[in-house]
Amino acid sequence: MRFALPIVALALTVPAAAQNVRAPFTVQETGQGFAQLDDALMSVRGRDATILIAPGTYRQCAIQQAGHITFKAVQPGSVIFDGVACEGKAALVLRGEGSVVDGIIFRNIRVGDGNGAGIRIEIGDLTVRNAMFLDSQEGILGGTSGAQVVTIDRSTFAGLGQCDETPDCAHSVYLASQGKVTITNSRFERGRGGHYVKLRVPNVSITDNSFDDTSGHKTNYMIDLPEGATGLIARNTFVQGPDKENWTGFIVVSAEQRKYPATGLRVEANVATLAPGQTHSPAFVADVSHDRLAVGANQLGKGVRPFELR
């Protein structure tokens, strides 16, 4: 199984573009440099662009209003957005035609409504790779009415989520759309509440990830599909920790409503175990949909029940 590459390892390779970037934010297509990310976005006037971000810790945020924008760290793992949210939402608020976020760290994002995120996606497709989301209320949050496609690869989510600060919980990844979410080669750990992945979408692909809840605090499910979904959950490694708000399931389907059919949802080739101190016996898959899920062979540790129909 392949996991997200450590940021230290990523930082060893510096792209040639880094040699040409002097300003904090440089529009690759024009060569213009800016001190503020928002100014760089305004300069492209809705055109498609790549914004190269120099190494540093930035206490600022930005709103993408149009176009296809790539936010790219010239040296992956050396760019940190720390503690500032635009519109009381996120470090990056995205409402263009599409966005790519590559090699950036987001940390310490907290807002009054409890949903402070590294990224808030409101319009357009999103690809996130080689990123880290740390010690915030939420990692990635978004909800649209369209057929949005979100892809997350080789990224780390740690110290995220909450259920104590506001009436509604926050989660490491929380997305809703009529499209598809793909999460691959990523790591989830040390949750602070809520679910690690919560998706209100009709189609999912969650493969080759690590969910380590050993040091989690008041967490809930590893994967919550509250309205159902089809797709694939495979080759993931799950460890459920002892400090749970809801320990009853690793993967839970249609806990809130049966909006999307779950027939054929494949759950296979995963590994699930309990951390020392976890004395309960959770279900690996808990199904409320009563559809015909395709739960295949999974390697389950002592105390983990294969399936529960609710």
Image (cartoon, rainbow, N blue to C red):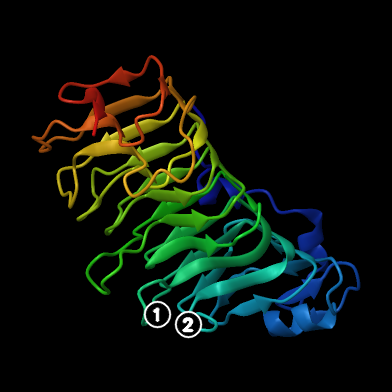
In the figure, is residue 63 to the left or right of 280?
Answer: right
Q: Which residue is nearer to you in this view: 296 or 38?
A: 296
User: How many neighbours does mark 2 have within 10 angstroms: few (below 14), some (14-19), or many (20 or more)?
Assistant: some
Rendered image: mark on residue 264 = none
In the figure, is residue 173 to the left or right of 131?
Answer: left
Q: Which residue is nearer to you in this view: 181 or 43?
A: 181
Q: Which residue is nearer to you in this view: 66 or 8?
A: 66
In the figure, is residue 258 to the left or right of 92?
Answer: left
Q: Is residue 302 above or below residue 226?
A: above
Q: Secondary structure at mark 2?
A: loop
Q: Which residue is nearer to you in this view: 97 or 79?
A: 97
Residue at 30% from the left image edge and 54% from the top image edge: 191
Dots 2 and 1: beta carbons under 8 Å? yes
Going by the numbered disc 2, the residue's amino acid type is Gly
Q: Is residue 60 above or below residue 96?
A: below
Going by the numbered disc 1, the residue's amino acid type is Val
Rendered image: mark on residue 88 = 2
User: How many neighbours does mark 1 have within 10 angstroms: few (below 14), some (14-19), or many (20 or more)?
Assistant: some
Q: Secondary structure at mark 1?
A: loop
Q: Would you identify the image quadrant in which residue 120 lies?
A: bottom right
Which residue is at the far right? 30
Rendered image: mark on residue 111 = 1
- Residue 27 spot, x, y in % from top left: 82, 72
- Residue 219 spot, x, y in % from top left: 24, 52
Mark 2 to mark 1 CA distance (whole Å) = 6 Å
Lower sequence index among marks 2 and 1 = 2
Give the position of the C terminus as an image quadrant: top left
Residue at 37% from the left image edge and 65% from the top image edge: 135
- Residue 148 spot, x, y in % from top left: 65, 53
Residue at 10% from the left image edge and 35% from the top image edge: 280
Let me know if residue 249 appears in the view: yes
- Residue 165 spot, x, y in % from top left: 25, 74
